[in-house]
Amino acid sequence: MSSANPDTPRPPAGRAGMKKELPERFRAYRHVWVFIELERGQVHPVSFELLGEGRKLADKLGVQLAGVVLGPPEEATQNAVAEAFAYGADLVYFVEAPLLADYRNEPFTKAMTDLVDTYKPEILLLGATTLGRDLAGSVATTLLTGLTADCTELDVDADGSLAATRPTFGGSLLCTIYTLNYRPQMATVRPRVMPMPHRADRGIGRVVTHKLSLAEDEIATKVLGFLPDSQSGTANLAYADVVVAGGLGLGGAENLQLVKSLARAIGAEFGCSRPLVQKGWMPADRQIGQTGKTIRPKLYIAAGISGAIQHRVGVEAADLIVAINTDPNAPIFDFAHLGIVTDAVRFLPALTEAFTRRLSPHSRDKLAS
């Protein structure tokens, strides 16, 4: 038995050692697609945010940007098609069927995979919502392609590959992931990570309709009724203009009342960092950060939050970040616009009192305008 020659050069590890030339069967795949998430007549705003990001990718690649609308035959579905064009789509792929009235994995996966197999997109983007995550995983598995979840940045590199960046190792690092030898390249992006693009009234452009080849008796799941989440309207952190949040620096659960009082005084939403949810001090729907809500407010006040990367990626798109912390070397001061080195437990009541004196109810509503 002969051993390998130690002088023989080995192929480089990682991305550099991978074959960049696409297999023949994938060379016809072109264009950027964005799934327009429509549920119970409402388009999720993340779909429009992704159209804005998809526009940038499509322009770099010199291809078209398409929206994908799956829904029942009703006015709201037609409106979703029109909105896709208003937010920049060049064309829309459209599957209209009664089976798509409520989200179920089987008919939506069938509709999407049939579209991909027929029209061959190069990139497919979906929102990292409950619905989008379920659909993306199922579609990627069915198509035997890669999926990068919860991305914070999207780009195309010199050879035209999608560069999808996301936090990893518990949010301690950012890594960029490539799907080199498979198509489509798929990614999900959380709400509020990307900016909302400008909306322009445009006429309906090219719509490619496709028939859903599936019958009700072929679907295992059935919709028996709809029960709205009684808590669904209690926290709207992702789309709040002003957010106040607390961290472990507050010292105890009882001091979260200081955060809530300030939020109430300035008409803001309130939230917290991950350790407070882990301790049971605040519910998970109030958590801000990579494993919680990504926010993009005009004003973010962080009290007693150290600002580890897991939290940073969830807030750094805010227009103005005000950090309050006793530690002058806390990581949050590296990206905050205004830093205040003091004890948040002592500072928050004074700040609340100052706002209460100066703001009338009318001006409080306009604080973030």
Image (spheres, rainbow, N blue to C red):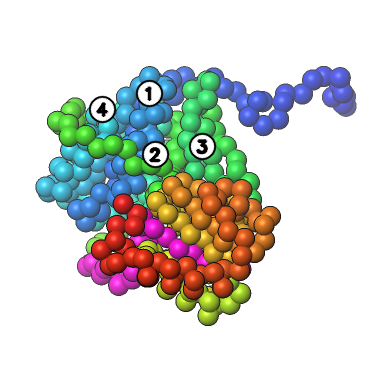
Look at the numbered discs 4 and 3 and tell me whether their residues touch, using CB distance below 8 Å: no
Residue reaching furthest to the left: 75
Q: Earlier in the sequence, mark 2 or mark 3?
A: 2
Callout 1: SS: helix
Q: Which residues are magenta?
A: 224-249
Q: Earlier in the sequence, mark 1 or mark 4?
A: 1
Residue 157 picture location, percent across and down: 52, 25
| Measured Cα–Cα span from mark 4 to mark 3 | 23 Å
Residue wearing tag 2 = 125
Look at the numbered discs 3 and 1 and tell me whether their residues touch, using CB distance below 8 Å: no
Amino acid, disc 4: Asp
| Measured Cα–Cα span from mark 1 to mark 4 | 11 Å
Residue 38 picture location, percent across and down: 25, 49
Residue wearing tag 1 = 59
- Label 3 Cα crowd, 10 Å radius (few <14 / some 14-19 / many 20+): many
Callout 3: SS: strand
Residue displayed at 61% across by 69% down: 343
Q: Which mark is residue 90?
A: 4
Amino acid, disc 2: Leu
Q: Earlier in the sequence, mark 2 or mark 1?
A: 1
Q: In the figure, 19 relative to 75: above or below?
A: above
Residue 70 lies left or right of residue 186; in this view the side is: left
Residue 297 picture location, percent across and down: 40, 52
